[in-house]
Amino acid sequence: MASLPSAVPVARYFARALLGSWEVDEARRWACQQVLSELVSNALEATGEPGGTDIEARGIAMMLVRFRLCAAHLVVEVRDDSAALPQVGDAALLDEGGRGLMLAESLASGWGLYTLAVGKVVWAAWDVA
């Protein structure tokens, strides 16, 4: 999907529909949507949003969102082309950002990242068995 502000609600909508079709319980669906919103927001921030109005001329970065459900885990991954690695923030009370990975730590069974030749993948997982 394009790295645009609309990616966050689009990803949440898709997650809600897909996880519902997979009959994932409501608590995990909610947690996954919250964490996914943060991971997509982080990818959006990492890849930036070029200016201009002509989409082809803007050179819009792309991100990839992938879901996997196996016998024991639900996994969501967000890939972007930025080499910058996310950091667990120490956000002050009134800071607008810096809590995404802290949220992943508290709502998911686990999270992590791996680097690629170009970019990285940040993932979160929930136990389902």
Image: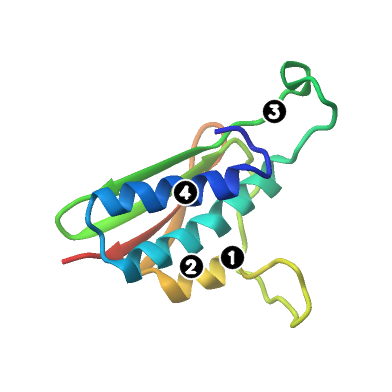
**92 lies above or below 97:** below
Question: Tags 2 and 1 in contact by the CB under 8 Å rule?
Answer: yes
For the question of whether residue 21 can be seen, the reply is yes
Instruction: Check residue 100 in the rendering and tell me which mark sits there, or answer none.
Output: 1
Q: Residue shown at 65%/31% (left/top)?
A: 61
Q: Percent from the top left, x then y, of residue 55?
A: 73, 22
**Residue on which disc 3 sits:** 60
Instruction: Check residue 104 in the rendering and tell me which mark sits there, or answer none.
Output: 2
Name which residue type carries label 3: Ile
Q: Percent from the top left, x then y, of residue 41?
A: 62, 52
Instruction: Check residue 13 in the rendering and tell me which mark sits there, or answer none.
Output: 4
For the question of whether residue 121 can be seen, the reply is no
Q: Nearer the viewer, residue 14 or 95?
A: 14
Name which residue type carries label 1: Gly
Q: CA distance from mark 2 to mark 3?
A: 27 Å
Q: Nearer the viewer, residue 118 or 77?
A: 77
- Crowding at dot 2, Cα within 10 Å, few <14 / some 14-19 / many 20+, comes out as many
Left or right: 104 in relation to 7: left
Q: CA distance from mark 4 to mark 2?
A: 19 Å
Left or right: 2 in relation to 109: right
Name which residue type carries label 4: Tyr
Identify the secondary structure beneath mark 2.
helix
Q: Earlier in the sequence, mark 4 or mark 2?
A: 4
Name which residue type carries label 2: Ala
- Crowding at dot 1, Cα within 10 Å, few <14 / some 14-19 / many 20+, comes out as many
